[in-house]
Image (cartoon, helix red, strand yellow):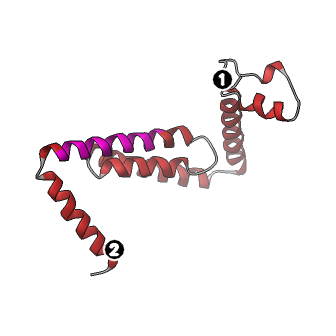
Amino acid sequence: MSRLGDVKHRWSRWRDGLRDRPTYDLVYRIVVGVVGLAVLGLGILAIPYPGPGWAIVFLGLGILATEFEWAHRLLRYTKERYDRVMEWFGEQGLWVKVLGVVLTGAVVIATLWLFGALSFAAGLFGIEQPWLKSPIGLGS
């Protein structure tokens, strides 16, 4: 048996042992649920930013799918839709791709402004402009 196969086998035996103890099984499922939802939430927040937002979403759903059938179905559905949208986006002309980059940039700048990061960064360079301050008072 390969090293990975051995690890999977030991994990499976350990998990089956937890299933035989209802209290431990419930605690394990709660921990998986909390961790999976936290990772999923972080991924959802990171989607509009350059980087691995969708990968984090899929990781969170993957964690949840280890214990919950609804998460397994949602993971499969989300991945199919994501693949379709990315295929569609790849087939589009330059203007759609540029528009996608501009809209992504606008979302990033808007959230940085809301969280007060623009005012903070400007302050590092001695630039104090009232319009850079967050309208919701964050980061001031």
Element type at mark 2: helix
Amino acid, disc 1:
Leu
| Tag of residue 4 | 2
The residue at 46%/46% (across/down) is 57
Name the quarter where the C terminus is drawn: top right
Label 1 with label 2: CB-CB less than 8 Å: no
Residue 39 makes an appearance in the image:
yes
Of 21 and 52, the residue lying toward us: 21
* Rendered image quadrant of residue 14: bottom left
Q: Which of marks 1 and 2 is nearer the N terminus?
A: 2
Q: In this view, does 45 lie to the left or right of 68?
A: right
Where is 53 relative to 45, above or below?
A: below
User: Where is mark 1, residue-wise?
Assistant: 138
Of 99 and 127, the residue lying toward us: 127
The residue at 17%/53% (across/down) is 18
On the image, the x and y values in percent for residue 81 come to 44, 48
Amino acid, disc 2:
Leu
Of 18 and 81, the residue lying toward us: 18
Q: Is residue 46 left or right of residue 72?
A: right
Callout 2: 10 Å neighbours few (<14), some, many (20+)? few
On the image, the x and y values in percent for residue 46 come to 56, 42
Magenta stretch contains residue 38: yes
Q: Give the range drawn in magenta.
A: 24-41
Name the quarter where the N terminus is drawn: bottom left
Magenta stretch contains residue 114: no
Element type at mark 1: loop
